[in-house]
Amino acid sequence: MKDRAADFLEFDHASGAYRISPEQAVRDDVEKHYWRHVGAAIIKDWRLYVMLVPMLLVFLFWRYFPMYELLGCFKVSDSVVPVSEQLFSGFSYFRRLLVGGDQLSTDFWRAMRNTFILSFYGLCFGFPIPIILALFFNEIRSNAARSVYQVLTYLPKFMSTVVMTSLVTMLVKQGSLTTGMGIVSQALSGLGFVTPEVANAGLLNNPAFFRSIYQISGIWESAGYDSIVFFAAIIAISPTSYEAAQIDGADKMAQMRYVVLPSILSTIVIMLITRIGSLLNIGYEKVLLLYNTNTYVTADVVSTFANRISGMAGTGTSAGTGIAAAEMMNNVIGMLLVIGANTIARKASNTSLY
């Protein structure tokens, strides 16, 4: 459909002809020399773009190039023949995992269920704790005291996973690793929450306690570090908002409810969307160091399931490719969760990630 002249030209009554308005002339010049302006901006800020190069290379080599290997999920596995030359097998590996009916399919659905349960518990119990910590930090008047408390809560995040899981194991004193009961096991046994027999056997040997230990240790490890974002949003609130609330008679709890929380709501929504996107992505390191054969029923997740099956003798290359298919399906579900959460947040609160 052709644009009418009156849409971008204005009529000059003196000359009786159409002419380009000054605003349209500016727009035409910007469109005509668009890439020239882009090049000038890049040359002006070239240092920033040079700093961007390492990140682009990381994404290129560790995020985009590995996508080529995902073709193996749809082809007949052969470790000798390159992926590009392998025969197309369709969705056979996905069908084996989902509706195969064998032990591999059963273990996969158990791992998928455990992955979702652990992630969902982490979202329900682990996501609000950093917000509460940030609110408490904001109420500490002494800068020195606040700095000390923040550093103490940040420290567990900087410990390696091996050190952190070793501390957790020592606290509950897993029977196969050390003798006697740890401090946590003694406290639970003394309060009557667990029997002495269960405590002596090791809480990490009991499937009923693995999820609780995993979630509590995860909160202890990352709550302080995750509170940085929320605390930064809180200190950006204008002091006049607090003064207006105080004039209206609001106490500290009322200020948190009616001033602080509404002011950081957009930050909470954005962080929640990103957290939902990784709902099914649980790293295998921590679970691998904490679980054992006794706790597979509640501890085995997709990543540890893939790591264990791919290393088992007799599974063959097809099993390894099937695990790659499982990881791919896990990531696709995570992408759909991000899109759904972002759409709901945009419609409900006009705040979204994109």
Image: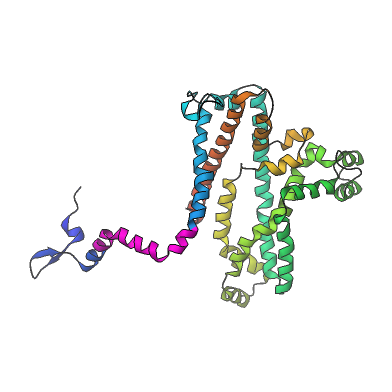
Q: Is residue 40 within the magenta segment?
A: yes
In percent of width and height, residue 258 lies at 60, 66
Q: Looking at the image, can residue 279 be seen?
A: yes
* Residue at (7% x, 68% y) in the render: 15
Query: Magenta segment range?
Result: 27-51
Residue 339 appears in the figure: no
- Residue 234 position by quadrant: bottom right
The verdict on residue 283 being magenta is: no
In the rendered image, the vertical position of residue 82 relative to residue 279, given as above or below:
above
Tell me where residue 150 appears, x and y as whole percent: 71, 64
Query: Quarter-wise, where is residue 99 in the image?
Result: top right
Work out whether residue 50 or residue 105 is closer to the camera in this orientation and state it: 50
Measuring 53% from the left and 49% from the top, which residue is drawn there? 58
Q: Position of residue 353 (x, y in %)?
A: 50, 53
Q: Is residue 191 left or right of residue 228?
A: right
Where in the figure is residue 254, as x and y percent of width and height? Answer: 65, 68
Residue 156 horizontal side relative to residue 187, left or right: left
Work out whether residue 298 or residue 62 is closer to the camera in this orientation and state it: 62
Q: Is residue 34 above or below residue 169?
A: below
Color scheme of the displayed model:
rainbow
- At x 28% / y 62%, what residue is drawn? 30
Q: Is residue 35 left or right of residue 273?
A: left
Q: Nearer the viewer, residue 293 or 214?
A: 293
Magenta residues: mostly which secondary structure? Answer: helix
Q: Residue at x 58, y 52 (%)?
A: 272
In front of the other: 10 or 180: 180
Name of the residue lying farthest toward the front: 80
Count of numbered tags: 0
